[in-house]
């Protein structure tokens, strides 16, 4: 199902392209684009589909990607480190979660929420000495750096963070505060 014809003018203006540029890309006349936008002409299904495909493609090229909003300074811990090490890293860097790695593979997440949950269930004095693997939550989702940032927001809300990878290597993290970069 195609969007309404009003979308053409709105999208074109949002992208900052002229009627002439859109007409050239679609292989139709500038006059035809003008008439469609003014409501004086209804294009054929094929012409409308082609215009919408061009606008969608241009919007995807201009949209904010995961790589644009992620924090590249990825602070992490290895599975064989102590929980005390993870907590120290979290406190000294003012962060609320730390991914846990086994070499270069993500295997879990240490988070403030998970720590608080475990503090209620276990004796407080034992926590610092515990291994990270005993206290960690499942790993967060990992997305490719080219994924549109808008698609990541529901994931971040659910899982507290999302890791970003480039060619299979995790090199960034997106938290709720990183999503605020989309507003700027």
Image (spheres, helix red, strand yellow):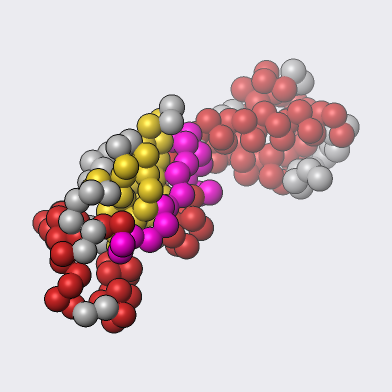
Q: Is residue 100 shown left or right of residue 89?
A: right
Specify start and end residues of the magenta stretch as a single range.
Answer: 134-151
Q: Is residue 12 shown left or right of residue 64?
A: right
Query: From the viewer's perspective, is residue 106 above or below residue 169?
Result: below
Residue 113, horizontal then vertical, whole percent? 32, 70
Residue visible at 69% across and 44% down in the picture: 7
Residue sitting farthest toward the right: 44
Q: Is residue 17 shown left or right of residue 183?
A: right
Residue 70, horizontal then vertical, whole percent? 34, 43
Q: Is residue 166 visible?
A: yes
Q: Quadrant of residue 84?
A: bottom left
Out of 75 and 137, give the one closest to the viewer.
137
Residue 177, horizontal then vertical, whole percent? 32, 57
Residue visible at 67% across and 29% down in the picture: 54
Q: How many marks?
A: 0
Q: Is residue 142 magenta?
A: yes
Out of 33 and 182, give the one closest to the viewer.
182
Residue visible at 23% across and 49% down in the picture: 80
The N terminus, quarter of image = top right
Q: Is residue 68 visible?
A: no
Residue visible at 37% across and 44% down in the picture: 106
Residue 114, horizontal then vertical, whole percent? 33, 68
């Amino acid at each position: 199902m195609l969007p309404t014809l009003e979308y053409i003018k709105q999208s074109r203006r949002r992208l900052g392209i002229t009627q002439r540029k859109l007409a050239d890309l679609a292989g139709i006349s500038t006059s035809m684009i003008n008439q469609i936008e003014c409501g004086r002409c209804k294009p054929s299904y094929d012409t409308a589909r082609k215009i919408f495909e061009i606008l969608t493609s241009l919007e995807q090229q201009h949209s904010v990607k995961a790589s644009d909003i992620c924090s590249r300074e990825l602070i992490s811990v290895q599975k064989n480190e102590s929980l005390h090490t993870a907590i120290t890293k979290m406190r000294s860097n003012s962060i609320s979660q730390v991914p846990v790695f086994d070499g270069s593979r993500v295997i879990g997440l240490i988070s403030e929420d998970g720590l608080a949950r475990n503090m209620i269930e276990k004796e407080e004095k034992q926590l610092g000495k515990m291994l990270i693997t005993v206290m960690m939550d499942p790993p967060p989702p990992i997305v490719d750096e080219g994924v549109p940032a808008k698609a990541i927001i529901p994931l971040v809300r659910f899982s507290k963070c999302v890791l970003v990878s480039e060619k299979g290597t995790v090199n960034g993290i997106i938290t709720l505060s990183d999503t605020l970069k989309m507003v700027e």
